[in-house]
Amino acid sequence: MEYELMRLCELPAHAAGVVEAVDECDMRERLEGLGLTPGAEVVRLFSAPCGEPTAYSVRGSVAALRRRDAAAVTVRVRIWD
């Protein structure tokens, strides 16, 4: 299996990834409080009509994040051949 690292804000709609890291930023504690911690599976659900915020499913909850906040999260995505 091959994997690719990307920012959470780059995750395609309805795709799933596993959190690898959360950058040091003002929102880090809040993001971790939402369940975005290393090893957590996250799924991009949908975006608002204007493009943000984007809804993500993580640890049984739905969180809406602005693009700049989602950019602080690195996820690992499986590449399907």
Image (cartoon, rainbow, N blue to C red):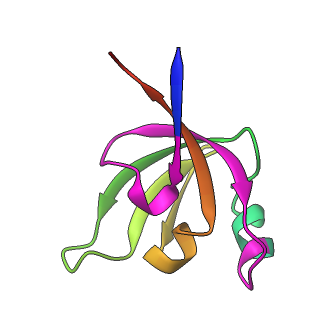
Question: Against 20, is 22 above or below?
Answer: below
Quarter of image, res 32: bottom right
Above or below: residue 33 compared with residue 30: above
Quick check: 7 left or right of 18?
left
Residue plotted at (78% across, 74% down):
24
Residue drawn at point x = 72 percent, y = 61 percent? 22
Tell me where residue 74 sits by quadrant.
bottom right
Picture residue at 73% right of the left edge, 53% below the top: 21
Q: Is residue 1 visible?
A: yes
How many discs mark residues in the rendered view? 0
The stretch drawn in magenta includes residue 58: no
Q: Residue furthest bottom?
A: 26
Q: Position of residue 3 (x, y in %)?
A: 53, 29
Q: Image check: 66 left or right of 15?
A: right
Residue at image coords 50%, 79%: 68
> 4 above or below 81?
below
Quarter placement of the C terminus:
top left
Q: Is 18 contained in the magenta span?
A: yes
Q: Residue at the far left: name it.
A: 49
Q: Is residue 66 visible in this depiction of the protein?
A: no
Region in magenta: 5-28
Residue 77 in the image: x percent, y percent? 50, 35
**Would residue 60 be found to the left or right of residue 31 on screen?**
left
The image quadrant that residue 25 belongs to is bottom right
Q: Nearer the viewer, residue 55 or 26?
A: 26
Left or right: residue 54 versus residue 33 is left
Expressed as whole percent of the image width and height from the top left, the position of residue 64 reads: 47, 69
